[in-house]
Image (spheres, rainbow, N blue to C red):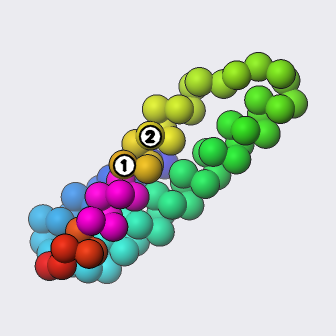
Amino acid sequence: MGIISILFLIFGWCFAIKGLVITSLVLSSLFATILTLCTFIASLKTNKKYYEAIDDIVIQFTILILSIVKLVKGF
């Protein structure tokens, strides 16, 4: 699922299309929220710490930050 938001961000930056960057922003925030909640709920239920999704969460937050930077900086 993370590859979709990465592709939207890359194509939005390359072709200077604001809609693709906004779509990347929305998708990455949605995926980051879902991954964070699922990881938190799973760790509460099993009393284990789950580190498998941490790299995906970091990637999604990075894409989220890059999308915000591109929107603030302008086209």
User: Where does the image place residue 46, in percent across and percent down from the top left?
Assistant: 84, 23
User: Where does the image place residue 18, in percent across and percent down from the top left?
Assistant: 26, 79
**Disc 1 target residue:** 62
Mark 1 → mark 2, Cα distance in angstroms: 6 Å
Circles 1 and 2, Cβ within 8 Å, touching? The answer is yes
Q: Main secondary structure of the magenta part?
A: helix
In this view, which residue lies farthest toward the top? 48
**Disc 2 target residue:** 58
User: Hey, which quadrant is residue 11 in on the image?
Assistant: bottom left
Q: At label 2, which amino acid type do we have? A: Val
Q: Is residue 2 above or below residue 7?
A: above
From the viewer's perspective, is 9 left or right of 62? left
Q: Is residue 47 above or below residue 65?
A: above
Q: Is residue 2 above or below residue 66?
A: above
The residue sitting at 83% across, 32% down in the picture is 44
Q: Quadrant of the C terminus?
A: bottom left
Q: Is residue 72 visible?
A: yes
Q: Is residue 8 visible?
A: no
Helix, strand or loop at label 2? It is helix
Identify which residue, 5 or 64, lies in the foreground. Answer: 64
The residue sitting at 27% across, 74% down in the picture is 71
Q: At label 1, which amino acid type do we have? A: Thr
User: Hey, which quadrant is residue 20 in on the image?
Assistant: bottom left
